[in-house]
Image (cartoon, grey):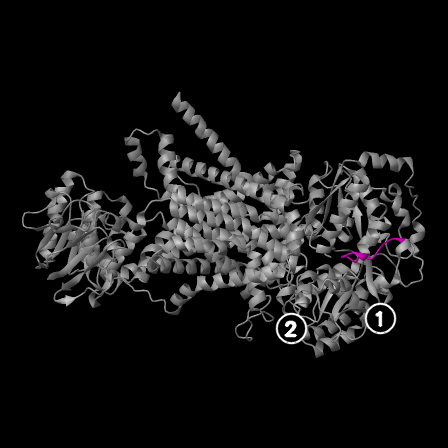
Amino acid sequence: MIFRRFSTKLTGLILLVSVSISNVMAEDLVVETLDETDAKWQQTLKVAKGKSVYFYAWGGSKAVNEYLRWAKREIAKQYGVRLIHVKVTDPGEAVARLKAENGRTSAIDLTWVNGENFAYLKQHDHLLGNLWSSIPNVANLAVDTLPITVDFGESMDGYEVPWGIGQFNLIAEEAVFSNAQFSANDLLTIARNNPETVTYPRPPEFHGSTFLKQLLVNLTKAEQRLYLAATQEAQEELLPILWAYLDKLHPYLWQQGKAFPTSSSEQFLLYQQKSLSMAVSFNPNQWIKEKATKQISESSVRRSFIDGAITNSHNLAIPKFAPNSEAAKVVINFMLSEQAQQQKFAGEWGDPSVLKSMFDSRSSLPAHGEPHSSWQLILEDAWQQRYGG
Amino acid sequence: MATTLRRLSRVLGWWLIICIASLPVWGILFGLWPDEDTSIADLSRLLAYQGLGLSLWQSMFSALFSSLVSLYLAFLIYSQYQSHSKVGGRWLEKYLSPLLSLPHLAIALGLVFLFSESGVFFVNGEFGLPRKGLSTFIMAIIIKEVPFFLLILITVGRQLPLHGWLLQGRALGYDTSTSWWLLVFPNILKHMRLALLAASAYTLSVVDMNLLVGPNIPELFAVSVYRWQGSFSEGDQALGFWANVLLLVLLAVSIVFLYCHEKLAIKALQHWAVLGRRIRLGFVDTLGSVWLPASGLLILLMVLVLTLWSLGFNWHCDTFSLPNLNTQLWQDEWLFVALPLQNALFIGVSAAILGILFTLLALELQRQKGRYLPDYIWLLGILLPQLSMVLGWQVSHIWLEGGYHSGWVVFAHLPFTFGYAYLVLKGPFQSIDANYELIGASFGYSPWQRWWKIRFRLLFPATLSAFAITFAVSIAQYIPTLMIGAGRVTTITTEAVAIGTGSQQDVAALYILLQSLLPLAAFLMTALLSSRVAGPKHSTLGISRC
Amino acid sequence: MLSIKNCLIESETWQIRFPDIQLNPDDLLVIIGPSGIGKSTFLHWLLGNQPKHVNISGQIFIDGQDVSQLTVENRHIGLLMQDVFLFPHLSVEDNISFALPKSPDLHSKKQRRTKAHSMLEQINLEHLSKRYPQSLSGGERSRVGLVRALANQPKVMLLDEPFAALDPSNREKIGKWTFQQLAQQAIPSIMVTHDLNDIPTSAKQLNLADYYQSKETP
């Protein structure tokens, strides 16, 4: 996944263990929901019929593309709506278009978005609101158990609807990463014993930045101040711990840290070609899917940081001036149906469900909340300053 | 009446040409117009960016070095094939087709897959290319640019009396190689100016190849520009604006550098000519003769690897067995690629033909005026940073409430095909002897007939090359196709580029192969055609008049 | 001294068996014959430029030395064609400097240019020395071409329809001047021409039509 996100305003850790733990944010979320039998929804279905929905979504994943081909067939069959996947290389392409359209009728009916892109679109009033109250299946979202009401510090407020879950994990060679969970120090030992096989995507690539956040969380023992706006003092105290660690780690990295993969995809290819002993992923089930299709070796396993995997959601939004917003709502509603969520999780993609009824601890990792969003830019800038030139 | 009509059509022609040629400026102005909150403070933030100096230096160096090395190598190869091989350029042109068809990215991919540390042929640290590094990046660019320069050389060379010069040079006691460098090179160099500009502008601003094999501590400048421009977080847009301005400065510097290089190179060669110096190239000569076979082999291997990947071969499999290969993916995807291929074909052919037509119009109008405007004016589409330019078009397209159909996409490709057509055709157009038309006039042909039956006829082989190149250029466009077509117009390239950002090597390989098919067909077709039609046969002038 | 022995031009349908040719330093041989018969081909072969469509065999001796196996650049044979192929990137004097042989007294750029200039002076063309070929008239080009060829001090000179591109008044004047120059330098020369007016009275003649044999069986 190539989404970039800001960290959430979550003030503590959220643990995604089998028993649901109530989310502080969930209480604010008294949204009225719509029933499928409601006349308003029936009207939406009627208007939607025969319309086309241009869905701007990353086109780099075969699994996602296949899933959308399936969804296209189902949506056509069930609702008479034509879903068209506009394959983009980066969600920023949709944002740039919405910025250029600036209030005119959009070429986009639906977009896959999160993080800073969502924040930008919401703040600049480019998105259609009230999605939560106008799409019936939103009622089934697992808002109590998953951190899916806030997108990297920006409250969703009905401007986007969660579609799936990302959890930071490693796909690794079992022989090298022998334990299910690892700490920063374990990683250093592994890198030292297996030089040139460990690396991470170059920040500010999103996976790379998250890797840094996970290290920082682990090295500072999830210090409270990471979940508050980053003060000068907190930075001066906490960041040097990370830099001292990276100074030790980098000489053992792939290319001795003189070059980094530019994306998680590239790192995955290097892993596939056995140049690396680990790859990074935001899909907790990617490893098992890749193994099933024989893309990676049998000895591949999933590994995560001992503090839990940083977890967030990826979402769907409708531009304010989308010509077929009603049809787009129908698509979102379908995407949140049990049928679609089941297919998404069980099919080639393996993306965890966001529905209450389908919450399954085995499909996900113990979760860890995002540090405060201010830390992300600080980490990226400081990394660039220290290691990027 | 007739003169009024002619004058009117000339004015109209100028207007048309000015419109096409100014599209890039229009795009840049609108696309780069800064947000209100962009300030000089952001510029100092950009200048303070860690590693900026090295990044700029490496970008400039790779752009200029790779273009110049490609040019010299291509000329060396051209001279050897022309002198030694009986079939000469004709054969060379056909041979070039596959080398020109594979996308840049595929070459880079092949290079690292085969020769980097973990690559198939990696022997030891001495010979391997770094997986990411300036040397790998430059190497990949050179491998891709040499065939491009060769094609331009063949096109230009066809219009010049090379063999007459060479024969005189040899009769005056100079060996073939010296004659090529002292007599032909200075005369061909100014015809290569546009190609050099285009190649270095490309290298300066290419992103995809850079991401794959370029160094990233620090990353080359184009990548930073792309990143800032594509990010909507606070401050990045402002950085993106200033970075684009800086990129324009780099372009201007490289233009000046290439002009100076041209002047100096010609001066130096004139100096040696007067001194009667002999030029010995030693081992470089060998490099020239092994280069093409070697890069041909590389491409062949790469196509083989891509084919294997697309048939389901996995690199991690410790044992390789043929029965595991299957055509499932080809069968699955075939349904989905037919339309994108068809769209790409339609857009490519239209944009190529229009680009050539407008180029001929621009050249003819300038010839009639008796003065040629500076080259870079016509090449702005190729020289200016693409993303900002297309962004400007996108904004205008939205204002105009233009529809999202292939017509607009063709229009958005036009500045690029126009630029490349101009680059290919200018030299050949200028070197056509006006006497031919004079003779035509004496036979009573009207100006239009003279143009069509004589000038265009003589230009035809060059036009064929121009068609193949502009067609390939159009096929390769991702940003204009997506941003103007808005997803309504999918081409094989929009599909291939999107899939290329992922990690599925089987699908990615399949799309790269499919993406290469159309240009390959165009290059092969034109190579075959141009060996059938006769251009100006300067090359055999000395011999044919027995 | 130039002598040519056992020369045979062969194509699929015809052949020409040349008589042995012997030229003294001040000799001029003019080869005539209908067009397409192989006159230019013969000159190019002498120069060392093997033609593609026919076979030519024979021996060439210059001052007693067999040059048949030497490459063009080692034969010291000058060639003047209808298009003299002046090099467009070099000025007139630099075109001539380029042709000057290597010798100790022609070492520096200055020495070479001075020499070229003085050669132009001898024929009153020094006003052209800084000009570029594109700006010369046809007659000027022919003359500069000959000066350039002579500057190289060739042992044999070949002229392939050298005056065909000139208008009649110039043609006679320049023709005369050319033969005079060649005679002065005592260079054995061979000229191919269509135009019988071009031929000076002192020249030997060879009509290829006399040696032409068709291979086709009736």
- Chain for numbered disc 1: A
Question: How many numbered marks, from 0 up?
Answer: 2
- What x and y, as percent, mark residue B410? 57, 39
Q: Is residue B114 visible?
A: yes
Q: Amino acid at mark 1?
A: Lys
Residue ID at (23%, 58%): B171
Q: In which quadrant of the rendered view does residue A147 lie?
A: bottom right
Assign a secondary structure to mark 1: loop
Type of secondary structure dominating the magenta stretch: loop
Residue type indicated by callout 2? Gln
Q: Which residues are magenta?
A: A346-355
Quarter of the view holding residue B47: bottom right
Judge whether B326 appears above or below A96 on screen: below
Tell me the tag on residue A351: none
Q: Position of residue B129 (x, y in %)?
A: 55, 69
Residue at x 74% of width, y 53% of height: A64
**SS category of the residue bearing label 2:** helix
The answer to whether marks 1 and 2 sit on the same chain is yes
Vertical placement of residue B247 versus A247, above or below: above
The residue beneath circle 1 is: A221
> Going by the image, does A294 lie left or right of C84?
right
In the picture of the structure, the residue carrying the numbered disc 2 is: A256
Work out whether A216 lies above or below B152.
Answer: below
Identity of the residue drawn at 66% across and 51% down: B333
Write the residue at 92% across / 41% down. A35
Upstream in the sequence, badge 1 or badge 2?
Answer: 1
Viewer-side residue, A128 vs A66: A66
Residue B129 horizontal side relative to residue C14, left or right: right
Q: Are marks 1 and 2 in contact (CB under 8 Å)?
A: no
